[in-house]
Amino acid sequence: MIQPVILSGGSGTRLWPLSREQMPKQFLRLTSSQSLLQQTLSRLEGLHAAAPMLMGHHSHRFLMAEQLREMDQTATLVLEPEGRNTAPAIACAALLARQTGDDPLLLVLPADHAIGDVQAFEHSVSAAVPLAEAGYLVTFGVVPTQPETGYGYIACGEPLEGGHHLAAFIEKPDAKCAAVLVESGDYLWNSGMFLLRASSYLDQLTRLQPAMLKACEEAVSSAHRDLDFLRLGEEAFRRCSADSIDYAVMEHCDHAAVVPLVAQWSDIGSFDALRAIASLDAAGNATKGDTWLTDTQDSLVFAEHRLVATLGVQHLIVVETSDSVLVAHRHQAQQVKQLVASLSQAGRNEPCSAPQVQRPWGSFQAMDSGERYQVKHITVKPGGRLSLQRHHHRAEHWVVVRGTARVTLEERSFLVSENQSTYIPIGALHRLENTGKIPLELIEVQSGSYLGEDDIERLDDVYARDNDE
């Protein structure tokens, strides 16, 4: 049996300002109407595999659940208290898979990759099954289409049925070295995808990473249910070293194999990688949204909220969101990560907070703000119910623009319909619900001395959140 394990802990900082800490790239609809996570789940359909296990950060749990709900997809949702890289995540998945007494093959897939040829992907997985059943830890190596400095490489060793012994990992090379590797024909791009038997991986951890394995065993044994989620034991999981499976296991394993993959694969690790898989116009431009390009070549121009026009430029990345605009040379696409780090060090909120913030009940988007005031557009999905709460530093004025709101204010409960409004004083106990059949939309005007999201005291919450969520 194949047990898919989807790793959804990445941050995708090279795709800022589209990708944020609160809304990383796996949840974005970059290449189709489905998010990258949803595409990853969809390509499992032809494998006749078990229901997937989705590993992700606890702060993204409602994002994961909502995207599964959109697909009518079931999965085991496992929450990590913090990111510890891939080796501990896969170890916990293997331990959980063994709890039923089975010993499945784990198909480990990052949630944020794009694959254009799903049949070719299925073919490579099928080719890897006999190797994994024989005890090999199998990774998938993408056949290079060009020298690429943004990927690590895998050196192919002696042939095996369906693949090769894995001879070595090569860190991301410079342009000259990448050209030599591709020209040789003996190296593949490191995709970060694996097929391995749960017990085989745990055996290797016993030999190579006993402390990590012990911490993961304790994290799994102390895991607890929280609504539809399984939370790994926080204290034990934090003791794990933050290592990738490549560094912790694969580089030291004498039963590692690589199977070639020719499936129009991309990890979409940068805007240049995104442009490479996009539809281009006659001048080599990739565009999305309301754009107007004149005398522009070989560029990527994305607009989310307003017209973006370019004139007489080439080799540019231009990305507009409601709160940020990035303009960069395409040759600097890999350095966006450093730009985001410098913004974070300067105390800016833009690397973390997304313009549209998802909540289990719906979402909100900041529209305007200034000294002592803030305006938000709030959408509550049918059946959505905010917590019973109060604020100590701000008052709120709600104007309903679509649907009907049920409002609880202290001891009263009443309906507020389209074009009607209500006022929530500072310190008043209140709740907002959508008991209707269509989304509820309202404009919220906040005023007060402090308008941070952590000014909230929850007295009752059906989603069991902390005050800072």
Image (tube, helix red, strand yellow):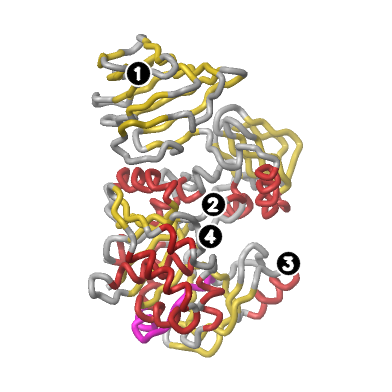
Instruction: Give the labeled residue for mark 2.
Output: 11
Q: Residue at x 24, y 26 (%)?
A: 437
Classify the position of the C terminus by image quarter. top left
The amino acid type of the residue labelled 3 equals: Ala
Instruction: Give the labeled residue for mark 3.
Output: 175
Q: Quadrant of residue 441?
A: top left
Between the C-alphas of marks 4 and 2, the distance is: 16 Å
The amino acid type of the residue labelled 4 equals: Ser
Q: Is residue 141 magenta?
A: yes
In this rendering, would 236 be left or right of 286? left
In this rendering, would 103 be left or right of 112? left
Instruction: Between residue 43 and residue 211, name the one nearer to us.
Output: 211
Between the C-alphas of marks 3 and 2, the distance is: 25 Å
Region of the chain picked out in magenta, as a range: 129-142
Please, is residue 214 above or below residue 365 in the view? below
Q: Nearer the viewer, mark 3 or mark 2?
A: 2
Q: Earlier in the sequence, mark 4 or mark 3?
A: 3
Instruction: Give the labeled residue for mark 4.
Output: 266
Please, is residue 136 above or below residue 284 in the view? below
Residue 404 location, x and y as percent?
29, 18
Q: Residue at x 41, y 70 (%)?
A: 91
Q: Nearer the viewer, mark 1 or mark 3?
A: 1
Q: Residue at x 34, y 34 (%)?
A: 361
Instruction: Give the labeled residue for mark 1.
Output: 402
Residue 34 location, x and y as percent?
41, 46
